[in-house]
Structures are given as C-alpha cells and as structure tokens.
Image (spheres, rainbow, N blue to C red):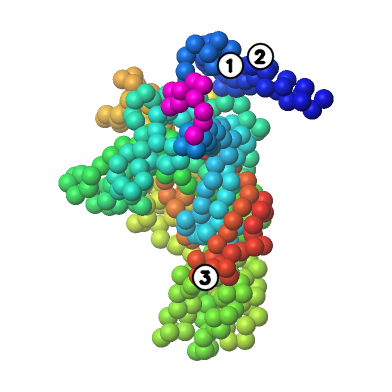
Amino acid sequence: MFQKVKDFLKNKYFRFTFAAIIFILWVVWIGNYWLLLGLPIIFDFYITQKVNWTFWKKRGQKKTVLIEWVDAIIFAVVAATLIRMFFIEAYTIPTSSMEKSLLVGDYLFVSKVAYGPKLPNTPISFPFVHHTLPFTKYTKSFIEWPRWPYKRIAGFGQIKRNDVVVFNFPEGDTVCLQDQNSSYYTLARIYGRDYIRQNYDIIYRPVDKRENYIKRCVGIPGDTIQVIHGSLFVNGKEQAKIGKRQYNYQIRTNGSTINPIRFEEMGIARSDINYNAQESVYILPLTEEMLERFKTFSNITEITRNENTDSTVMWKLIFPHDPRYKWNEDNFGPLWIPKKGATVTLTTDNLPLYQRIIDVYENNDLRVENGTIYINGEPANSYTFKMDYYFMMGDNRHNSADSRFWGFVPEDHVVGKASFIWLSLDKDKRFPANIRFKRMFTTIK
C-alpha cells in the first residue's frame, strides 16, 4: 500500500496537476492572467520534457555532489525569494524610535499578507538584499528597467489604528550617498539645495528600494490628529494606552548618583543615560511604569517631563516645513489625514500640507503663480486624493523621526505588519547573557 502511494506521488501526471493548480491559484491571487502563458512550460517540465529547463545538468546523468548542491541552492533561493516577497520577511530594530515596545536588537518577522503584499516596483534585483550590493558602499542591487507600477494584491485585512507597521521611508526617494541616515530634504532646507548638490552625490530610489522604517500607525485615512503638550489626540480623543510609550524626563537628585543596577533592572540602555554631574541631573527616556518607580527613590528631588515649547524655528524640521505652521514635536496639528476619493479645498495657506502628495506621491505637475495654484497646467481650487495616507509615530516620543517630521505615509509605501519577535539581543551584554529569552517568540502589541 505504501509503495502504491509513493508511486502515485511520483507519477508525472499527478505532479503536473498539483503544480498547475498551485500555479493557477497564484496567478489568480496576483491578478495578472498573462502569467497563465507559463502553463505550457510547466507541462513541458513534467510531461513532454522537450526542453532541458535545468540546464546546469544533463538529462540521464547521475547526480554528483556538486549538482545536488546546485539544485538545493537554486531551490532555496527561489523558495526564499517568493516567501520574502509574498508572505513574510525578517526585519531588525536598528534604532530606539519604538522603545520600549520594541528594543534595539529585536529581530522580527513582518507579515506581507496582513495587508496584502505589494508587487515589486523593481522586479529584477539581487536576492536577499535591499538597495545596495553586499561588500559595496554605493552599488545598486537592482536594475531600473523594467519598472512595474504600484499594485497590492489581496491580504487578510487593512491597516488598523495602533498597528505596528513597516513601510518605505517616504522621503527616501532622493538620497545623499555620503549621508544616507539623513533626509535629503532636511539637509536641503538647512543648507540649501545648491550646497547639497555641490558636496554630495545624489541618487534616486524607487519606492520598494527606499529604507524600511517601523512605527506605530496612530492615524488612518480620514482621522484628524493633534499633539498637545506631548500627548496625542485622535479625532479629539486622547490615544489609548497601547504599547510602551516613553518620553524624556529631567531627573534631579540631592547630589548623589543613581545606582547603575537600577537602570539595568528597568532595561534602560547605557547609551540612553545622560548625566550632568555639576547639576546632579539625569536626562532619561522613561515609560509610565519606570516613572512611577523613579518617584520612589529617596535621593530624587524633582522629575520634569521634557517639552519643546519653541514655535518659531522648528519649521525646517517639522512637517509641513512652512514658517506659517508653528508646530513642533510636542505641539503639533490639528492635521487631517487624506483619504482615497476625498476632495479637499486648496488654498495657498493649506497647500504646504498636501503639496508633496499632489506633486510627488500622486505624480502631478504642481506650481503656484501669482497666488493661483495650477495642477497639470490647469487652475485648481480643490484636489481629490488617489490613495489612502497614514500618520506614523514612534513609541519613543522624544527620539523618533516620524510623521511629525516628514508627513504622511502613502499606501503604496506600506510593506507589512510587524507580527512577532523571534530573537532579541542586548547590545550592552555579551553572549549568552545578551539573549533576551523572555522576548523571543512574543507577539508585537
């Protein structure tokens, strides 16, 4: 009986039928029925065998160890590429912008099917790398042509408020190669475009090859968000307590220092501890739980949460980068988040809020002449949005480059939902003490 089952599974017609069904279901999911032209290839591979598709080995030749390795590597690369493209992708936390919900050294799996995987804009690229070839500084890992338009296929759901989302950096279309950690647009506002272009090599990156960021989605299309004294309000209501938000605090002591063991117990990284010995003041990022614990320390005399009250000079850093909007990271908005199909009245006063959407994300020719707004050469006093947009913020509210600094995240920049942590390593400790076992295989909230 077992031999009959084994022979049936090896039957070429069964193998062809099984492969064809999987392929057809994949084509239906993708929604590009031209791909059905690949069925004759599958038929020939399993049935007629007119073409040697495994060209690296001869038919009928006994497999050598080398050929077996080549077969295994090719299969692994193809399988892993498809899994990474359509289902799940590994991601690591490089910065503290999401602490303490996520920690530097957390290794995550990001679900592509949670919101539906998007097809790559640059389908021909080196496998398993993002935008730069391994062992090089600036060499692109992708070919500019062909370039596919944005298309997202069906997933399990939509982005919900407070989801932790991975997305392509919206301002990452233009990059200064010698300073890739900074936004080109921020550098240009501070130093001027002429200076930047004279002193840096400037390149352009398509959407899917821009840097990956991870933040919490605090505002979905149609929401109105506002930050008042550091507290976030969505549609007039304060954001629900979700995740582990932290703010920077000034902690004054009676002249004595705080035992370093206390910082380690609370998970405060050494790089986060700033101490002014002359004034006996610490500046620390704290969650609410940490704050309550510090209040019990007998040598602490005063605790004050930091707040930026400047309303004049932050416009070069804070969205929408216009001196008429006197916002900062602690006092921001109100700001309405654009929704697909919604129409907004345009004026020269509110144009800075939507200028990048109209001009860059939705690819229109936008200009202003003598107080009149022109879109694609026609005078315009309104605009209807073609995509949904989102507002992202880090849980580390005073140490996060997020939508408060560069604005909305378009739907075509969304990569996926951060699902669970599979490994976590503490950079301040040595192996094996650096493994945070309690965080491994935990879901992300």
Amino acid at dot 2: Tyr
Please determine whether, in this image, residue 324 is positioned above or below residue 257.
above
Q: Nearer the viewer, residue 324 or 143?
A: 143
Instruction: Tell me if 19 is positioned left or right of 144 in this view.
Output: right
Please determine whether, in this image, residue 72 is positioned above or below residue 239.
above
Q: Residues within 10 Å of mark 3 (few under 14, many from 20)?
A: few
Specify the quadrant that holds the N terminus.
Answer: top right
Mark-to-mark CA distance, 2 and 1? 7 Å
Q: Nearer the viewer, mark 2 or mark 3?
A: 2
User: Tag 2, which secondary structure?
Assistant: helix
Q: What stretch is highlighted in magenta?
A: 55-64
User: Tag 1, which secondary structure?
Assistant: helix
Quarter-wise, where is residue 241 in the image? bottom right
Q: Nearer the viewer, mark 1 or mark 3?
A: 1
Mark-to-mark CA distance, 1 and 3? 52 Å
Residue at 47% across, 80% down: 281
Q: Main secondary structure of the magenta part?
A: loop
User: How far across and down, in percent of the image, does residue 61 sit?
Assistant: 49, 25
Amino acid at dot 1: Tyr
Give the residue number, with chain letter if any, for mark 1. 46
Residue 13, labelled with which disc? 2
Q: Which of 187 and 224 is in front in this view?
A: 187
